[in-house]
Amino acid sequence: MFPEIIPARSVRGAIDSFVDHLVENYASTLETLSQPILDVLVWLEQVLRSTPWWLIVIAVVAIAWLVSRKIVLSLCMGVLLCMLGVIGLWDAGMQTLSLMLMATFLSVLVGIPLGILMARVNWLRNVMLPVLDVMQTMPSFVYLIPVVMLFGLGKIPALIATVIYAVPPLIRLTDLGIRLVDREVLEASRAFGATSRQQLFGVQLPLALPNIMAGVNQTTMMALSMVVIASMIGARGLGYEVLLGINRLEVGRGLLAGLGIVILAVLFDRITQSYGHRVRRQGGQR
Amino acid sequence: MSKIEVKNIFKIFGSHPAKWIDAARNGISKDELLAKSGHTLGLRDISLSIEEGSIYVIMGLSGSGKSTLIRHFNRLIDPSAGQILVDGLDVMSLNNRDLESFRRKKMSMVFQRFGLFPHRSVLENAAYGLTVQGVGKAEREKRASEWLEQVGLAGFEKQYPHQLSGGMQQRVGLARALATDAEILLMDEAFSALDPLIRREMQDHLLALQAKLNKTIVFITHDLDEALRLGNRIAILKDGELVQEGTPEDILLNPANDYVQSFLQDVNRTKVLNASHAINPPRLTLTMRSRPAHVVDRLHAMNWEYAPVLDGKRLAGVLTMDAAQVAMRNGARDISGSVEDLATVPATAGLDEVLARLLHSDKPMAVTDDNDEFMGMLSRRKLVELVTPPPSESTESVFAPSAASVAAKAQATSDGAVVADVSPPADPLSTGDVAGAESPTAHRDADQLASTVDAGGPGSAKEGVVQRDKV
């Protein structure tokens, strides 16, 4: 037996009472703070669900074409999306899609600035790296409990859990992308008297863009893998279908919903990746 | 006043450079410092003064600190100790904002691996300095495309850097540096990544541009041929220390130590040295008014066959002993009627060209300066000595100082109006056989060179520029 130095029970107790304290005093504040995000998410879901399906298919094909400039790929994306409707999961798919879009948007909003800061400030990088490791390895249920206690069941805790799990690769790859920018190219911009803002937006970010896009791609993939867990705390959509299938031992329901998630994953993946490729080609970094 | 002045620069890389500055001042060796403290000595006590409008070459092998040094001029690297003055302004006193505007206006830089922005078109690359300055789009694109045309890249504006060859990419780098109209151009091994033919082409291009623009250029290279070709002055670095500083001739004729000497082994000397290095100071010059009898006496006294004749400062020709005796017998008042034509070479002619001419005649040859004024007679022995690298140091030190002083003496005498006489017999014809003995090697050199001679090797790049301009 390992000697007991600090009684584990009291440590647990301290953490519990700290969380209780947080919930008692800040739960309502946090809820009002998160209200705008919830509003946007609900609005996005409404828009996606009420738009006729063919309009959304056309929109996805158009976006795919704008991003990749490949006609075949864009049409395939449209067909794939139709498959979602064919297996009868259109509505659930749109719910999941809205959560995904919101989670990706928030991840980009948080991840890219953090990545930039990490690349520029060495001590922040030293602090952030272990934090990112924790975020990626800590079982998500562990932080789901306090988040649910703070925000209640529903979309917001699902969103937060998804972002926590999905944002690390974006932060890492933004940091890496900026650090990988050719030293001499950056030196050239300094030698011509560029301010640090001009260096960042004129040189570092554009050259890091392929890596950042790879990060966005990873983030969407990881966010999708969170939908089943998110559905446990009240996010509806494809994950909820999977959950129902498990609970009722309906293998068919579970399998089809799983297929729906895969379809969304392929859509996100192809579109973000082909954008990354095009940026790379334009950048001439062959 | 010098454009850039660097005073006692030290650079120590590591976590606590300030601690070890005194040790570096007291002459701790690079290895010892590294072993003791883990700090790397980048530069030790460098002081340089760079004249406005000159090309100043900093030379050294990799790791000698030359790239570190050039980055001190625009403070891409801060020195651990020392002072940097540009136009009398202490660069170290600038705050961030002033430093940025200093970099925008005063200096621009060309990089070894070009440092082009891969995501910007050639035109946007060339316009980058102006973009940073906040010049409007139309204006900066107009100016950038003018410079692209200057470097011979008209029509490539819409391309991206990766679509161009190395040489063309570096032209973009050059256009980008020139587009800001900065007075000082820093070139960090700018041509080192290019293949030899393109490199030479770029050197010519730079010299031609410099003749027009007259910027202050600091050029880094590890290639002595390049240094000698471009530099008005050259500084040689080794392990962060300044080994020698001087004109290309200084370095070639008076290498400071074995290190410099070892660089010089493979240098094509005939390209760098010119006729002015191979002259004998005029010990006896005649004027058109000299009396024949007097001339015969003098020639007899010195045991010479002939002597150059001046008309004012200009060279009139040569008077041989025979002609002088004939003139004396005919009772001529002066020697003006007996002067024969004398072959001349300009002082700026490269030794390769001089060699080629000497091989075709065994007549004496005179050297004249830019204004056609007489500088002295070409010495065949000196020529051979200059062209043949010294086998050992002792030979070098024997002949080198004399050759250097020759130039000074020649200068002095050609300034004084009419000159006459004195001192022991020197070579003119008598040393012709020395040249003959050496001629197999000399001949081979000359043949190799004759094919590549352009307007004659520059004695100093300045003269080279002038010549090219005329061409």
Image (spheres, rainbow, N blue to C red):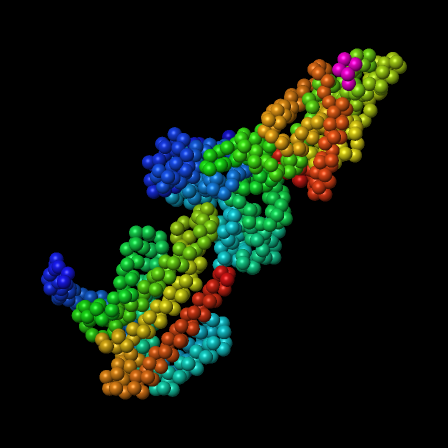
How far from the left and from the top, in percent, is residue A24? Answer: 13, 66
Q: Is residue B191 left or right of residue B322?
A: left
Specify the principal SS of the magenta part: helix
Q: Residue at x 28, y 59 (%)?
A: A130
Q: Is residue B165 left or right of residue A131?
A: right
Q: Is residue A174 left or right of residue A39?
A: right
- Position above or below: B73 against A14: above
- Specify whether residue B87 is in view: no
Q: Please state which of residues B368 and B61 is positioned toward the viewer in this rendering.
A: B61
Q: Residue at x 63, y 48 (%)?
A: B197
- Position above or below: B138 against B232: below
Q: Residue at x 35, y 70 (%)?
A: A220
- Position above or below: B108 against B90: below
Q: Is residue A81 left or right of residue B292?
A: left
How far from the left and from the top, in percent, is residue B91? Answer: 42, 37
Residues shaded magenta: B300-304
Residue that extends furthest to the right in the rendered view of this protein: B330
Image quadrant in which the N terminus of chain A is located = bottom left
How far from the left and from the top, in percent, is residue A154? Answer: 22, 75
Q: Residue at x 47, y 79 (%)?
A: A75
